[in-house]
Image (spheres, coloured by chain):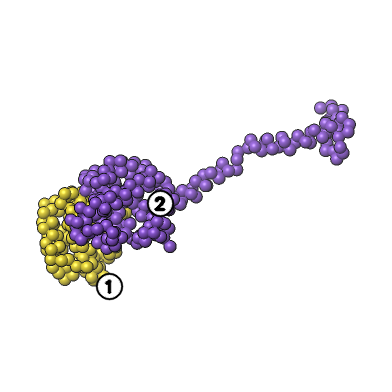
Amino acid sequence: MSLSAKEKVIVKDFFAKVSSRSDEIGAEALARLIVVYPQTKSYFAHWKDLSPNGAPVRKHGITVMGGVYEAVSKIDDLAGGLLNLSELHAFVLRVDPVNFKILSHCIMVVLSMLFAEEFTPQIHVAVDKFLALVALALSEKYR
Amino acid sequence: MSSYKRRLFILATSPTQCRPTSKINKIQHAFWRSVPILLKTLLKLRPSVYDSLDSVKETSTASNMVQWTDFERATIQSVFEKMDYDDVGPAALSRCLVVYPWTQRYFGNFGNLYNAAAIQGNPMVAAHGKTVLHGLDRAVKNMDDIKATYAELSVLHSEKLRVDPDNFRLLADCLTIVVAARMGAAFTADVQGAFQKFLAVVVSSLGKQYH
């Protein structure tokens, strides 16, 4: 499964269009991850405040979305471009890769909520593929 | 009691092996015939052994049932009440066919599914989307036993339609995304949690009769 040239354009254009609200998207997506999938809280035990609207969750959501935008800029070579992030997730954070899938789902729910008109099925499939490939690139260094 | 009366009482009420002949025997006979009836009445009045078992019965069946909080029940009823089935059903099914194209394998006789525009404009897809969404009505009305509610539908999907149960999860994800788009900010994290839990139970119940 790989992105066609047309799909790469769709993804870059869409993420450019929504970049003004990228902080909001990131914070909301991470908040949903923690509420809808409580098992993910296990990765954030070191935060004192795990409330969805709290500062740590917001700040980290913005960080994660920053990573997604970095992936958009490296869309032509995800595996190579995301090597550092992959090492971070594999050796330091040790996040189980199944969580990449559910975070992708949460990101897409938020995109659909905030940009109902723009998030058409054609854009949905391109973004879904893109996030799946990002997850795959992040899993590169796991074993 | 005087000793005379005591002796008479004992004589009158002691068990007798003989057929009642004398008056004393008849009194004895009547007395002992009435004892079991009295005992039965008294036993009926005592608290039933099953009364204390009821709570055990409830927990044992409850442990097989999905537990819904009041918030979850209210949320599911409210989301489906406000939903426009004729809009959401077709949108969810067509989205599923576009985003996960391998799901098109089940709709070979639906005509033109060649590209996203064709799928979204296809009237058979739209009609079937409404059918599928109305199928969720039964679960919404019967949240306490979705497994039994969908037993027949599960057999249908397994034996006749031969749908890979993983597709139920894919359609559920698309439905979540469409409902999020329709509800906007009202689709909070807690509402999403309740909605996804409901769909997860539906998906699991539909897969239950596969073998």
Q: Chain of mark 2?
A: B
User: Is residue B102 placed above or below A119 in the rendered structure?
Assistant: below
Q: Residues within 10 Å of mark 1 (few under 14, many from 20)?
A: few
Give the chain ID for the purple colour.
Answer: B
Please give the name of the residue rendered at 66% of the width and 38% of the height, measured from the top-left corner: B43
Q: Position of residue A67 (x, y in %)?
A: 17, 61
Mark 1, secondary structure of its residue: loop
Q: Residue lying furthest bottom in this view?
A: A143
Q: Which mark is residue A143?
A: 1
Q: Marks 1 and 2, Cα distance to the nearest angstrom?
A: 42 Å
Quadrant for the N terminus of chain A, please: bottom left
Could you tell me residue B21's position as x and y percent? 88, 33
- Give the residue displayed 26% in from the left and 45% down from the top: B86
Residue in front for this viewpoint, B28 or B106? B106
| Residue B116 or residue A71, whichever sits in front | B116
Q: Position of residue B84 (x, y in %)?
A: 26, 43
Q: For mark 2, what is the residue?
A: B150
Position of B65 with respect to B33 (left or right) is left
Residue name at image x 46 percent, y 51 percent: B63
Q: Residues within 10 Å of mark 2 (few under 14, many from 20)?
A: many
Disc 1 residue type (three-letter): Arg
The amino acid marked with disc number 2 is Tyr
Q: Is residue A20 visible?
A: yes
Quadrant showing the C terminus of chain A: bottom left
